[in-house]
Image (cartoon, coloured by chain):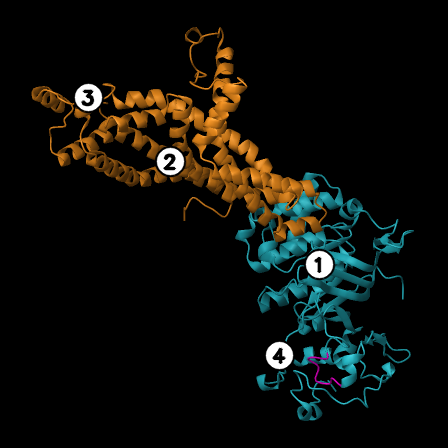
Chain colours: A orange, B cyan
């Protein structure tokens, strides 16, 4: 019960944050010189045409009127109409968001599955060769931009080796009849995984490196804890100490880094989607900005902000689950 | 006297650091007999905790036991011999790491740590941690171990143990946590418990309760204790015999009454003089002058000479090994100080030296208060 109340309260607290995001994005987007109509109609448009389109999208009203109109429509769940696509913004987002979430989810799965064992081994074998290897990998990982990793992956694995496709993405839930070379849903999923592999590594490497680093330092600390000494003094096997006694305590900072990593990964997704030609939220936001599609810029930014807020809330809830000292704030 | 339960001979543990070799424990010998509480006393940095972790062979890197012998109930916890190539190597009968873990740690020798706030794992329930140790060291099933754990919590005076079993360490006060740690040690039914300054972090009233409880439980279970402390009043309260450590060496060893009333080493006297007592005012307190030198490069001669109010020239040159100083028929009492005639190195003829304690020649002649006569 307290968990539900806590979650609801956190979402309520997120509302001012989201209003802030809308406000800042709204005024920033409107500060860009020119407007979408100029882009739409080319260099020498007819004056009546311009005014007709402005009126259609409500751009002829003063900026503060538009601002409050936008706020109230967002409150009812209406994100407006995309000028560029000429479709409701929400519809575009519903189409694209699952693609980005799929990419992020696989990137994080890759990052967590590789980083946690790597970090633990590194901490356990501190200053031994295994530790050096893992530290070099993670140092390279945190200092290499994700788009560059993506390009190198394409050159090596798609271009030279031809193991993986370089562009596009087959969605695992796509209808088999629409997917070339697939007869069953299972084959669609296989194709999807094949496509996802390179972008997953491209986007996940930075996360993997960051999680490895924090996992290592956190485990190093935890392995020096008095409770670890106590467990050793009572004959607890070393493997149990690492897996149970030291591990659980050490995961608190790791969870925080994973949660914060969500926001960097959203940024990274924009680049990764561009490199791999994936039609996700990242591409959508770039198209929106390039075409000064106000409604789409605000809609996508708002969704990014929302995903981030959800990430933080999930982090906090995991925290209180892992550490009994953290409570939901109920007196 | 019967075979001792634990016998430590000439134990040496060193830390190999970048600054040099720290001789944290430098050749100490002592015994613990069945049912005895043996004190290990000294200032911070004297090597008490290193000595106790050496007994469990749990010295953290870069530390290492480099010499000596530790025997426990006829088994060799540590012992070296000279191999064919002239290098020292572990003796065949020395317990392996696996045997130490399975047969000695927890099961035969349990430890109570100094800091009850840090010693319990914050993310597991108190009961769960206690149960885990009981399961490992007494070969009990989960259910039996849980019952045993609850009984033990009750035994150490934790109210409502059934409900507190499922609580987390942060829900316990410092004194209660220390009781839990004591319950852990007792619940494994070891023959020897090493208590490493278990009451230092607690306030005095709680300390009193804990000491009283330990004395009671010690009578009941007849467990032997090594009680590590820097507090002479705790020693007086519970110990049977006492070893006084200074800079990695045991400098005096005696039964508790002898130590207090027939003190033989100036360092012990100094420790006793620095202890606040109700019958003395603050002005009469005499803290030990100076700080303990580094164990990396201990002073030549007697290691205490730089702070000793009774130091003479000879103390700089002669390094005294502990000697038996008791008369025939008395309980054993050893000390390592050349002022006793038994050493025969000409202490009486040697001129006093300037030390941090004497502050100069003139002061040295009048300052004789170090002796507890």
Quarter of the image where one finds residue B172: bottom right
The residue where tag 1 is placed is: B16
Task: Categorize mark 2 by other alpha carbons within 10 Å: few (<14), some (14-19), many (20+).
Answer: some
**Which is in the foreground here, disc 3 or disc 2?**
3
Q: Which residues, given as a range, are shown in magenta?
A: B305-312
Q: How far apart in space, not on screen, are marks 4 and 2 (Cα)? A: 60 Å
Circle 3 chain: A
**Which is in the foreground here, disc 4 or disc 3?**
3
- Under circle 4, the secondary element is loop
| Rendering coords of residue A7 (x, y %) | 39, 37
| Rendering coords of residue A195 (x, y %) | 48, 19
Q: Are marks 4 and 3 on the same chain?
A: no
Circle 4 chain: B
Q: Residue furthest left?
A: A48
Disc on res. B276: 4
**Which is in the foreground here, disc 4 or disc 2?**
2
Disc on res. B174: none
Q: How far apart in space, not on screen, are marks 1 and 2 (Cα)? A: 49 Å
Q: Earlier in the sequence, mark 3 or mark 2?
A: 3
- Compared to A300, does A169 lie above or below? above
* Residue B94 makes an appearance in the image: yes
Residue A120 relative to residue B195: left or right: left
Q: How far apart in space, not on screen, are marks 4 and 1 (Cα)? A: 37 Å
Residue nearest the viewer, comparing B79 with A322: B79
- Under circle 3, the secondary element is helix
Q: Does residue B309 show up magenta in the picture?
A: yes
Disc on res. A40: 3
Quarter of the image where one finds residue B241: bottom right
């Amino acid at each position: 019960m307290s968990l539900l109340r806590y979650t609801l309260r956190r979402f309520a607290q997120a509302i001012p944050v989201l209003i802030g995001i809308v406000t800042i994005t709204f005024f920033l987007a409107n500060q860009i010189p020119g407007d979408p109509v100029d882009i739409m109609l080319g260099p020498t448009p007819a004056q009546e045409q311009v005014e007709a389109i402005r009126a259609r999208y409500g751009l002829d009203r003063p900026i503060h009127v538009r601002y409050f109109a936008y706020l109230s429509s967002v409150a009812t769940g209406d994100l407006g109409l995309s000028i560029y696509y000429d479709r409701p913004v929400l519809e575009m987002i519903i189409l694209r968001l699952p693609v980005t979430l799929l990419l992020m989810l696989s990137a994080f799965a890759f990052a967590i599955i590789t980083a946690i064992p790597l970090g633990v081994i590194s901490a356990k074998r501190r200053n031994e060769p295994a530790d050096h290897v893992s530290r070099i990998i993670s140092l390279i990982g945190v200092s290499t931009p994700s788009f560059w990793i993506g390009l190198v992956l394409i050159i090596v694995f798609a271009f030279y080796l031809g193991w993986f496709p370089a562009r596009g993405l087959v969605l695992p839930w796509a209808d088999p009849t629409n997917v070339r070379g697939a007869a069953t849903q299972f084959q669609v999923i296989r194709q999807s995984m094949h496509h996802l592999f390179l972008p997953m590594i491209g986007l996940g490497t930075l996360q993997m490196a960051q999680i490895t680093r924090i996992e290592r330092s956190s485990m190093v600390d935890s392995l020096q804890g008095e409770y670890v000494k106590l467990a050793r003094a009572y004959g607890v096997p070393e493997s149990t100490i690492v897996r149970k006694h030291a591990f659980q305590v050490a995961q608190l900072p790791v969870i925080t880094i994973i949660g914060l990593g969500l926001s960097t990964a959203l940024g990274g997704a924009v680049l990764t989607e561009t490199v791999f030609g994936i039609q996700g939220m990242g591409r959508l936001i770039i198209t929106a900005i390039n075409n000064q599609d106000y409604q789409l810029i605000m809609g996508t930014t708002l969704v990014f902000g929302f995903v981030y807020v959800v990430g933080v809330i999930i982090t906090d809830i995991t925290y209180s689950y892992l550490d009994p000292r953290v409570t939901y704030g109920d007196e | 006297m019967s075979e001792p339960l634990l016998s430590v001979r000439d134990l040496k543990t060193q830390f190999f650091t970048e600054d040099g070799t720290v001789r944290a424990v430098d050749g100490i010998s002592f015994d613990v007999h069945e049912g005895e509480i043996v004190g290990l006393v000294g200032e911070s940095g004297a090597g008490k905790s290193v000595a106790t972790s050496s007994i469990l062979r749990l010295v953290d890197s870069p530390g290492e036991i480099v010499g000596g012998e530790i025997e426990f109930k006829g088994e060799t916890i540590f012992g070296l011999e000279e191999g064919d190539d002239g290098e020292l190597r572990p003796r065949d009968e020395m317990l392996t790491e696996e045997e130490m873990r399975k047969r000695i740690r927890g099961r035969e020798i349990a430890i109570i740590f100094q800091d009850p706030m840090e010693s319990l794992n914050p993310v597991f329930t108190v009961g769960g941690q206690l149960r885990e140790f009981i399961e490992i060291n007494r070969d009990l099933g989960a259910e039996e171990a849980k019952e045993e754990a609850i009984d033990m919590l009750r035994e150490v005076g934790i109210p409502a143990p059934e409900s507190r079993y499922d609580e987390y360490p942060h829900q316990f006060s410092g004194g209660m946590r220390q009781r839990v740690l004591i319950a852990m040690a007792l619940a494994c039914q070891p023959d020897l418990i090493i208590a490493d300054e278990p009451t230092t972090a607690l306030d005095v009233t709680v300390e009193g309760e804990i000491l009283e409880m330990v004395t009671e439980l010690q009578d009941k279970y007849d467990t032997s204790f090594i009680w590590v402390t820097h507090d002479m009043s705790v020693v007086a309260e519970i110990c049977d015999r006492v070893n006084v450590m200074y800079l990695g060496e045991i400098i005096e060893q005696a039964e508790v009454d002898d130590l207090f009333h027939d003190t033989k080493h100036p360092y012990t006297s100094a420790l006793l003089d620095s202890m606040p007592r109700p019958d003395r005012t603050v002005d009469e307190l005499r803290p030990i002058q100076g700080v303990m030198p580094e164990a990396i490069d201990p002073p030549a001669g007697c290691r205490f000479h730089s702070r000793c109010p009774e130091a003479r020239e000879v103390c700089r040159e002669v390094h005294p090994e502990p000697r038996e100083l008791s008369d025939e028929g008395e309980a054993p009492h050893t000390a390592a100080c050349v002022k006793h005639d038994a050493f025969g190195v000409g202490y009486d003829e040697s001129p006093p030296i300037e030390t941090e304690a004497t502050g100069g020649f003139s002061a040295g002649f009048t300052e004789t208060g170090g002796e507890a006569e």
